[in-house]
Image (spheres, rainbow, N blue to C red):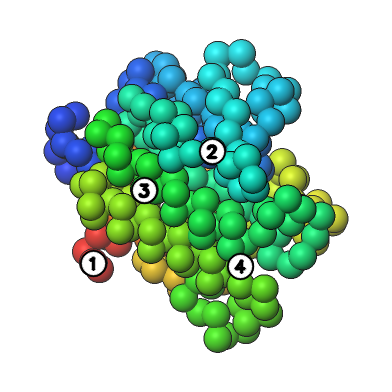
Amino acid sequence: MPWEGGTSPVSSTNNKKSAIQSNDKVVIFGATGGVGQLVTKKLSARDGKNYQLTIAARDAARAKETLENDDIDVVELNLVGENKATDAELQNAMKGATGVVVSVGTTAFPTKRWDGGNNPKAIDMEAVTRIANAASNVDTVRRLVLLTSVGVNRTKQMPFLILNLFGVLDAKRAGEDAVKNAASEAGFSYSIVRPGRLVGGPYTNLDLANLFKIEGGAENGVDIAFGDELLGDCKRDVCAEAVVQCLENDSCVDLEFSLVSNEDAALTDDGWSSAFTSMSGTL
């Protein structure tokens, strides 16, 4: 059942954990991926917000071509390999930002995408940890949203036992822990978004949902649960909306949750607020 109704608590723009505001700078790692593209487009299209978006990408030219938005600042940074960005370069990319989105990843099983060291340990654990630690040294950061996966706490259960054969869920869980530790140290708010199997465009990954162009539910309805409880498909569009809500919604503070799509109507902003407030009560 989708969440309905609800109100947002009062928040001050001076609060270290408060939601991002109009004209704020938001940095997105992984913006050329399927969900990352949608997060970028949604933030760009928010009426009256005029967010200042910065994309961190290993190939600036490809990122600009993919996103087709000349108003977005692109910083060329490698997260893995011999030429990976220094801690200072990561911090500089986030300088002045209030929001940070981390939507990086690779395939769960060995593919060409692992070339150059882009494996789960390097990207989901080590790179995410470095981004989180860098963000903790940027005074302006108020919110960091990390996209991971359902199953991080259920690696001994099927089907996650198979998915984790090469350690992708272990790596994602380690990245989550790093984000939470950095948030605790620096005082900013974290959100851990754990979608089910991602379906619907844009298709950028080598999986069955891509091969068969699985679209998922007819609408962008969503089931949300605190922690790591759900199992099913999640449309990339609703996953991207969850990420944006974690940045903008006053009710989303220090939360980790799973989500899967259903065929109900999309949540309103108040619906998201109600869901976040309900989950906050389980902490």
Give left or right: position of 65 versus 134.
Answer: right
Residue sitting farthest toward the front: 82
Query: Which callout, 1 or 4, points to the residue nearer the camera?
Result: 4
Q: Is residue 261 visible?
A: no
Q: Please determine whether, in this image, residue 93 is positioned above or below residue 238.
A: above
The relative height of residue 218 versus residue 31 in the rendered view (above or below) is below
Q: Amino acid at mark 1?
A: Leu
Q: Nearer the viewer, mark 2 or mark 3?
A: 2
**Residue that label 1 marks:** 283
- Which residue is label 3 attached to? 133
Q: CA distance from mark 3 to mark 1?
A: 24 Å
Earlier sequence position, callout 3 versus callout 4: 3
Mark 2 surroundings within 10 Å by alpha-carbon count, few (fewer than 14), some (14 through 19), many (20 or more): some
How many angstroms separate mark 2 from mark 4 (CA)?
Answer: 22 Å
Amino acid under label 2? Ala
Gap between marks 1 and 2 measured at Cα = 35 Å
Secondary structure under badge 2? Answer: loop
